[in-house]
Amino acid sequence: MKRTIAQWLETDHGLGAVSDTPRLDLELLLCRVLGKERSYLFTWPDAALDAAQQAALEGLLQRRLAGEPIAYITGQQGFWSLDLEVNSSTLIPRPETELLVEVALSLLADRAGSPCRVADLGSGSGAIALALACERPAWSLVGVDRVAEAVALANNNAERLRLPNACFVQGNWCSGLALPAFDLVVSNPPYIDAADPHLGQGDVRFEPRSALVAGQQGLADIRTISEQARDYLSPGGWLLFEHGFEQGAAVRELMQSLGYAEVATRQDLAGLDRVTLG
Ligand code: GLN
């Protein structure tokens, strides 16, 4: 029996067991199989899915019910003002990471129209670099990631979003940067301790561990980047990290011990330590 959009939306598919947003998830899956925007669902509630669409939707529902993140199933995730393509080679961009973009923009507010050089280390889908490239057409952004699939994904995003001032290269932190003298180095590195129970819950179970987990209570990569970045920053340049909400003091201490000045931590919308700069 063919079911209409409204009938699919009225049915309880059990998504509440795996998602905090079961209704939204279902809408996004419907949009995916129909190839439509969400507004279509409310404009044409009586449109029936054909057999192929129905089978496709059932397949996607099974994946979601098995816990796979909605962003990996649909291949899309919104970040800042951008619609990014994502896949399981990278972390799914998160709303709290928008704070990193906000702080970066405010640190260089007086240079909004100047040709600043900015590096994003561990760039993943390209979210941070692309948001900055979009806001600041005069800046040039280079993203570095160790994973070839992530580099290809981010370059595709840059091309599709028509942001020619961002490009992505494969490399290991600063070794991927050809020249020194960056005005800003940003990073959302792995910072979760391997023993953190959060790793066994929800979407993170499907994300690459290499993008999440770091040694030394999650601080190993933040330390490596802080050491390397000193040689890549121009005088007065800034280094900016996202980190865990309990890591603010440790990151400040680490950066100060490596000679960074004006070290400070900023809080996210939940009031939690999330970004440290120096
Ligand atoms: N904030 C993410 C989480 O807690 C982790 C992001 C990261 O490790 N860079 O799931």
Image: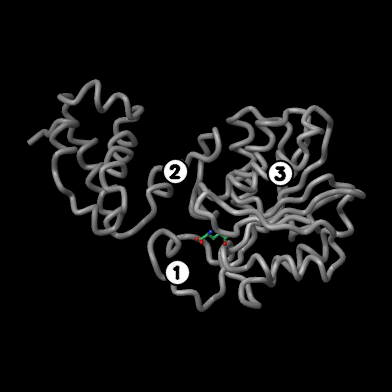
Quarter occupied by the N terminus:
top left
C-alpha gap between disc 3 and disc 1 = 28 Å
Viewer-side residue, 254 vs 170? 254
Ligand 1 quarter of the rendering: bottom right
Identified by mark 2, the residue type is Gly
Count neighbours of disc 1 (C-alpha within 10 A) and say few if under 14, some if 14 to 19, many if 20 or more.
Answer: few
Queried on whether the Cβ of the residue with tag 2 lies below 8 angstroms from ligand 1, the answer reads no
Q: Which residue is mark 2?
A: 75
Q: Is mark 1 within 8 Å of ligand 1?
A: yes
Q: Quadrant of residue 130?
A: top right
Q: Earlier in the sequence, mark 3 or mark 1?
A: 3
Dot label at residue 198: 1
- Residue 148 in picture, x, y percent from top left: 64, 53
Badge nearest the viewer, 1 or 2: 1
Spot the residue most to the right. Answer: 235
Point out residue 57 in the picture as x, y percentages from the top left corner.
25, 42
Q: Quadrant of the C terminus?
A: bottom right
